[in-house]
Image: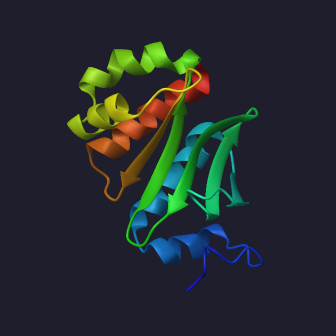
Amino acid sequence: MIDLQDKSLRPDLEEIGKYIRNPVFTEFCQEINNTYNCNEKIEYSGCSLEKGWNTKFKKSGKNLCTIYPREGYFTVMIVIGRKEKESVEEILPECTAELQTLYSQTKEGNGQRWLMIDLEDHEDLYRDILRFIKIRRYS
């Protein structure tokens, strides 16, 4: 088992998947890679709130999302900025109640909301996250 806090040992995507032990992680990563033709970048964050290894997906210099591994699930961080806000709020009523609540409870700072969305299954929330990423990519 990998130690996500050990800065000296960079895990690969397969090792992160084994740590999470949830096939949705691999599916999600493949979907992002295939849809946006981008590769993941595994980075170590020294941030006190989320210290450890994470996986970033970037396209054309824009961070589409960052994945923080957990045991049994993972957290997807999506930044909704000024460019994305109107489009996201337009589709928000169609999204899961969970995501609507998370969005409304996430404070906006400098015109951005940093959404931290826990994902463990391939249900409606999965689809909603992909919709937010698509807005982020094309805004």
Residue 107 position, x and y percent, is: 43, 31
User: Which residue is the extreme one toward the bottom?
Assistant: 1
Viewer-proximal residue, 77 or 40? 77
Residue at 41% over, 67% down:
23
Above or below, comparing residue 132 to residue 51 in the picture = above
Which quadrant is the N terminus positioned in? bottom right
Judging depth in this view, the residue of 101 and 86 nearest the camera is 101
The image shows a total of numbered marks equal to 0
Q: Where is residue 84 in the image (x, y as percent from the top left)?
A: 52, 20
Q: Is residue 96 above or below residue 51?
A: above
Horizontal placement of 78 versus 13: left or right? Answer: left
**In the visual, does 102 lie left or right of 16?**
left
Residue visible at 60% across and 48% down?
Answer: 33
Residue found 40% across the figure and 47% down from its top:
117
Location of the C terminus (image quadrant): top right
Instruction: Indicate the position of residue 6 as horizontal and vertical percent values.
Output: 69, 78
Residue in the image at 45% along x and 13% along y: 86
Vertical side of 84 occupied by 18: above or below: below
Q: Which residue lies furthest to the left in this view?
A: 97
The picture quadrant where one finds residue 90 is: top left
